[in-house]
Amino acid sequence: MQIPEVSSKVQNNIQLMFIDKPIEADATTDIIYMMCPMHLLIIDQKTKELKVGQILAVLTDYDGALEDIPAWCIKTGNEFLGVYEAEDHYKFYVRKLIEKSCIYKET
Amino acid sequence: MKEIYMDHVATNPLHPEALEAMLPYFKEHFGNPLSLYEPGIKAREAIENARASTASLINAKANEIIFTSSGAESNNFALKGIAFANQNKGKHIIISKIEHHSILNSARFLEKSGFAVTYLPVDKYGVIDPAIVEKAITKETILISIIHASPEIGTIEPIAEIGKIARQKGIIFHTDAVASVGNIPVDIQPLNADLLSFAAHQFYGPKGAGALYLREGTRIVPLIYGGIQEGGRRAGTENVPAIVGMGKAAELAKRDLQKRINHVKSLRDKLISNALKVEKVYLTGHPEQRLPGHASFVVEYIEGEAMLLLLAGKGIYAASGSACSSKALKASPVLISIGTPAHLAQGSVVFTLSEGTTEEEINYFNEVFPQIINQLRKISPFAKGWGDMEDKTCTPRK
């Protein structure tokens, strides 16, 4: 998969975040073929279901996630563990660090 | 003049309870389900309740239901969405020759986009042999889509067996159950289907509301991109009243299904046995394995459209087969597929009953229908025989 152009601000960070092999996750969510902002909604929703310390894998082919998921982690105080480049999609790994990470209103 | 509606496979009147449930969502609960304030929350809750009862009708999980605008949209979504999501695995799709146009034309579109499509034959009753499905599978096959029940000839297909084959081979399986959900019991679990299309107006819900069942974990490419509605899989502000109406109609269909089946089946059998007493009237579709309120015939020497006009003159509303074939006066591809000779296929007529159909109405119909056939045969140029017009090339299928 070709890495798309992203803003220079996060480009260097993203390059460093690619990992060589998948990580064992506690939960996996597959949103391949879904577009913005499903990756942000789903990560928000799925981390709510995890315990602190657990790892979520997000499978997506949406390029915008390369910027958005690390940014979401910074904003919400969760740990971005890296992104693995599979054949036709990305696997993003996020470790839940705080109990309340929701940036959307709870309903 | 009394009016007798016998075209329930075309559509149905809205159930009064469904209408009642819908009304507040046109007026006071007008909010956008995505809005975070109270009116939005009300609308969102209503959609999720409707999703739960719609899912329950086919024994699915609520998160496996995607609301659409119609059965046709669900069928388009299923075929294109699964084909594009799996094109890296293979580019072969299997459907039957008796699919609805929303499947047939989606398949034709996919052919133009580089996919290969196998159109499976059916027997003289319109039944698809699961063994033929199995034979058609190649290493490239990514999707099988077979109609659950034909709205044109009423035949119910062996979907569970076909689904089992697809499951064993690891191929995604879709069934178009628009004519069957709400008319016969449909339980998604034994069917082994990964996707299933259905529409609200087939079971007294509103028009403009359909659903696609998508088994949890199945990837699909959206038809409509935009917002996050339906989990990002079908964008566009939801038709909240229609979805609420579908949910209510699904709840009622689940509750009343057996009662509805028993009612229409006995009336349907009475209609069929009476019609078959008329000379050269033939039942199309399977004699037993058919939709309970469905009676379809070909009547020799006269045209379906002519029968419909005279029946309408007597207040009886029916159909001559698929709407597309009827408009273009072409022989129906479904009737041709079951081996009906072209000269007979023109005489197609379909009657579909509902829980509102009465014994009195069927008695009236049984009196009028043979009269109309006789009346038309008197003026038919073919009444003394087909002559050169007979289609001798067609051998009925076994």
Image (cartoon, coloured by chain):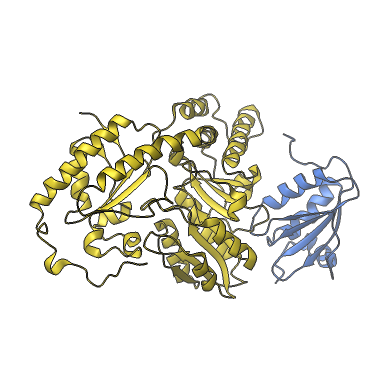
Q: Residue A20, located in which quarter of the rendered image?
A: bottom right
Q: Position of residue B85 (x, y in %)?
A: 60, 64
Outermost residue to the bottom: B139
Task: Give me the residue at 55% from left, 27% from top.
Answer: B29
**Quadrant of the drawing holding the N terminus of chain B:** top left
**Which hue is chain A drawn in?**
blue
Residue B59 vs B145, above or below: the answer is: above
Q: Is residue B233 visible?
A: no
Residue B74 vs B266, above or below: the answer is: below
Compared across the picture, whether B118 is left or right of A15 comes to left
> In this orientation, which residue lies closer to the viewer: B313 or A47?
B313
Compared across the picture, whether A54 is left or right of B123 comes to right
Q: Position of residue B88 (x, y in %)?
A: 62, 71
> In this orientation, which residue lies closer to the viewer: B109 or A70?
B109
Q: Position of residue A27 (x, y in %)?
A: 81, 53
Chain letter, colour yellow in render: B
Task: Give me the residue at 41% from left, 64% from top.
Answer: B122
Task: Give me the residue at 21% from left, 48% from top.
Answer: B278
Q: Is residue B96 visible?
A: yes
> In this orientation, which residue lies closer to the viewer: B291 or B111?
B291
